[in-house]
Image (cartoon, rainbow, N blue to C red):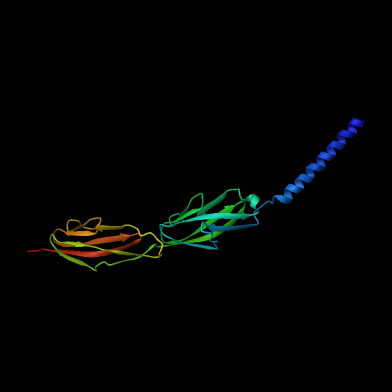
Amino acid sequence: MRDIRTRRTIILILAALAIAMAIVIYTIIPSGVTSMEILTTEGERLGQELNIYAGSKVQLECRVHPDVLADRGTYFSVADESIASVDETGQVTGLKNGETLMTIQHAGARQNITVEVQPSVKSIKGLPDEVTLYEGDGYLLEPKVVMAGKKLEVPDVTFKSKRTTIAAVDADGQITAGEPGSTTITVTAGTVSVKIPVTVISGY
C-alpha cells in the first residue's frame, strides 16, 4: 500500500514538474516574431522601398525579435525576376529598368518591399551626330559615359556596325570606311545605346 502511495506521489510530482516546465518554455520562447527589420550591409534600415541601379548588387540582412527565433531560415523572393533577382542569402541584383515586389519571410512574419531598378548609365556623350568619310578613311569614336551615381563602375563600351562592308568598327571605336553607301554604328554602354549614321562616299 505504501509503495502505491509513493508511486502516486512521484507521478504527481513529475506531472507538476512537466506542467511547470511547459509554462516556462511557453513564457520564454514565444510562438512567433514580434518585430522584423531589413537592413543593408552598411546598416541602412529599409522601409517599403529599395532603389538600386541596373547591374548593381545590394546585400540584405533580416533581423527579428525575439533573438531566439533568429536562427530560423529567412526566405527571399521577387515577383518579376527579369527586373531584379535575389538569392538565398538576400543579395539583390538589379537587372533592368522597372519595378517589382520583393517578399521576405521569417518564422511566420512577412514583409514586402518594392524594388525599383534604375539605369546605371545616364547618357553617352562626346559622339558626333553623323560621320561622313571617303573610302579607306578612318575615324575614331571617343564616347564619354555619364553614370547615374558617382560611385558606380563604368561599364565597357561596345561598338557595332550594321553593314561592315560600308563601315567597320573595332573594339576601340575606330571606324574604317569601306565601299560607298550608308550604314549605322551603334555605341552601347550598359542599358544606353546611341546610333550614329555613317556615310561613305567615293574618293574618285
Residue 47 in the image: x percent, y percent? 55, 63
On the image, the x and y values in percent for residue 19 come to 79, 44
Which residue occupies 20% across, 66% down? 131
Left/right placement of residue 171 relative to residue 51 reads left
| Location of residue 57 with respect to 8 vertically, above or below | below
Q: Residue at x 54, y 63 (%)?
A: 48
Residue farthest bottom in this picture? 129
Foreground residue among 30 and 100: 30
Could you tell me which quadrant the N terminus lies in? Answer: top right
- Give residue 166's quadrant in the image: bottom left
**Residue 140 percent location from the top left of the image:** 21, 62
Residue at far left of view: 204
Does residue 94 sit above or below 7 in this rendering? below
Q: Residue at x 30, y 64 (%)?
A: 144
77 and 190: which is toward the camera = 190
Quarter occupied by the C terminus: bottom left
Q: Residue at x 29, y 57 (%)?
A: 158
